[in-house]
Amino acid sequence: MYCGSTQIIKFDNISSIFVLMDTTLKNRYDIIIIGGGAAGFFSAANIAISRPDVTILILEQSKEVLNKVRISGGGRCNVTHACFDAKTLANYYPRGHRELIGPFTKFGCQDTVDWFDEQGVRIETLDDGCMFPVSNTSQTIIDCFINCTDLPTISVKTQSKVNDILFKNDDTSHYTLIADSQEYITDTLIITAGSSPNIWRILEREGYEISSAVPSLFTFNLPKHPISTMMGLTVPDAIVQIKNTKIATSGPLLITHWGLSGPAVLKASAWGARDLANMRYDFEAIVDWLPKITTDDISQLRNSNAKRKIRTHCPLSLPTRLWHYMIDTIGIHPDKVWADITKIEMNALITSVKAMTFNVQGKTTFKEEFVTAGGVALSQVNFKTFESKKHSKLYFAGEILDIDGVTGGFNFQAAWTGGYLVAQDILNSI
């Protein structure tokens, strides 16, 4: 590793070798990582486990490292998802699904579980496929990374914003980073800075194509909509479709005091991230509350429940409050029995159940799950190693890339996969 420059000095015809320390060497590292998040620490941990002698500097611009890991999953950290086929797993990524198939065959969800198990961290699977540490706290994951990188050869500097990067060129074989009014030098640079406009700007200046950043994984705002009075109500399996698009997603749907949320909505926001941004978040969302029930099934209810009052007898698997909301909105008299429902009322009821339309006006960040679509264009990256095609020994992983997944541990899995393959390529070259 780096130790200084060597010169031969003669004293009375005796040659002595002295190591003359270059004053810049205190800021020279084998590897520098920009970004102290999931991908950055996973790269560092995998390198450190195999080569604890390698000097690594992690630069993080915020006050704390691994902050997103800390708050993910309500403080529990949704580490990954129980999806063990590479092609199936890749389908959970609106951007990056084609590029990730190969990497997932090398380091997928099962590899993640095995890796943490080797470090003494057990992972469990919930009914929805989401996977969390058995300890039920994200601090377990943070402690794991800190333990792996707690070496004298690894330095972590927080509140260190990288203001500029001088890239390798014909005149120099190393990268120079400007941060904290200091210069840091390395031959190998890993950029895992997340959604960083500052780093994107530097890369764009260097000739990299950056896909424009737009929000992903957000909820739908319904200003002053009466359905918001049922905040907290959940339907376990709904379909959300964005009108005039091909976007249609399924899953649990949650009514909040500001509008619609839950996995079905979050997935729709991810797959429609760019379309919805172009619509300025003013669009119509159509909800099918019971995808497994057909319109004919609902029509037959008039005969099978003829003498029962429609308000007090709901033969559908809908929450009572939602059913009453539908009946009241349509204007069906509370004492009316099923047999007396008019054709117009029945059609309105079918529409309410199968295609209730909401005028969405705006979005709301979904707590810690918020991610950004956009970043380094994927055509500029070798996905066998996550190395740049433009500069040698420059790597990208995590949200700095134009890769993002739906909610459920998929964004972390992309970070683990990228970080692992970066580490392996570096280990193979040193």
Image (tube, rainbow, N blue to C red):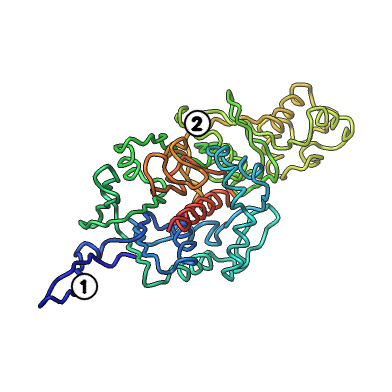
Q: Which residue ends up furthest to the left in the rendered image?
A: 12
As shown in the figure, which amino acid type bears the numbered disc 1? Answer: Ile
Residue 143: percent from the left, percent from the top? 49, 69
User: Disc 2 or 1, which lies upstream in sequence?
Assistant: 1
Residue 193: percent from the left, percent from the top? 39, 50
User: Which of the pair 376/24 is nearer the observer?
Assistant: 24
Where does the C terminus fall, quadrant-wise? bottom left
Q: Which residue bears the numbered disc 2?
A: 276
User: Which of the pair 210/168 is nearer the observer?
Assistant: 168
Residue 294: percent from the left, percent from the top? 79, 31
Name the residue located 74 percent from the left edge and 21 percent from the top edge.
344
Give the side of residue 100 with respect to residue 278, left or right: right
In the displayed structure, 265 sits above or below 298; it is below
Q: CA distance from mark 2 to mark 1?
A: 67 Å
- Give residue 17's mark: 1
Which image quarter: residue 122?
A: bottom right
User: Which of the pair 360/311 is nearer the observer?
Assistant: 360
Does dot 2 land on a helix, a strand or a loop? Answer: helix
Name the residue located 25 percent from the left edge and 55 percent from the top edge.
179
As shown in the figure, which amino acid type bears the numbered disc 2? Answer: Leu
Where does the N terminus fall, quadrant-wise? bottom left
Give the side of residue 301 with respect to residue 375, left or right: right
Give the side of residue 301 with respect to residue 238, left or right: right
Does dot 1 land on a helix, a strand or a loop? Answer: strand
